[in-house]
Image: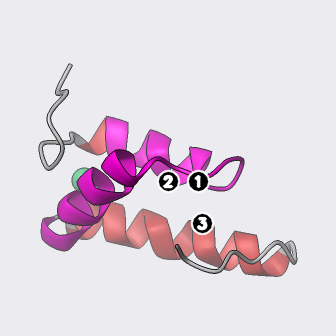
């Protein structure tokens, strides 16, 4: 498993994205996730999909 912030794999990133809907991610998780999203189009796509679902369900988060 990648355990360093900034070295997430897509699978870990998509898991974190899903978990972000259920709980607050730790700063370390968020940093790793953002770093990955910055360079991974696939996961950015997945994120927008989740955000859409999230918004549709009325559970918007402040983003931090
Ligand atoms: Zn990815």
> What secondary structure predominates along the stretch shown in magenta?
helix
Res. 4 image quadrant? top left
Res. 54 image quadrant? bottom right
Write down the residue under mark 3.
50
- Name the residue located 19 percent from the left edge and 62 percent from the top edge: 35
Q: Callout 2 environment at 10 Å: few (<14), some (14 to 19), or many (20+)?
A: many
Q: With respect to residue 31, does 25 lie above or below?
A: above
Marks 1 and 3, how far apart at CA: 10 Å
Q: Secondary structure at mark 1?
A: loop
- Label 1 close to label 3 by CB (< 8 Å): yes
- Name the residue located 75 percent from the left edge and 80 percent from the top edge: 55
- Name the residue located 34 percent from the left edge and 36 percent from the top edge: 12
Q: Residue furthest top?
A: 1
Give how far across and how far down residue 25 sits, in percent: 51, 49
Write down the residue under mark 2.
17
Taking the magenta stretch, the answer to whether it contains residue 17 is: yes
- Picture disc at residue 33: none
Q: Callout 1 environment at 10 Å: few (<14), some (14 to 19), or many (20+)?
A: some
- Label 2 close to label 1 by CB (< 8 Å): yes
**In this picture, which residue range is highlighted in magenta?**
12-39
Give how far across and how far down residue 61 sits, in percent: 69, 75
Q: Secondary structure at mark 3?
A: helix
- Label 3 close to label 2 by CB (< 8 Å): yes
Taking the magenta stretch, the answer to whether it contains residue 33 is: yes
Write down the residue under mark 1.
20
Give how far across and how far down residue 62 sits, in percent: 64, 80
């Amino acid at each position: 498993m990648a355990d360093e912030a900034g070295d997430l794999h897509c699978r870990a990133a998509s898991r974190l994205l899903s978990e972000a809907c259920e709980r607050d991610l730790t700063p370390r998780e968020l940093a790793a996730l953002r770093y990955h999203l910055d360079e991974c189009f696939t996961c950015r796509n997945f994120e927008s999909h989740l955000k859409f679902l999230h918004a549709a369900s009325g559970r918007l988060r402040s983003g931090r």
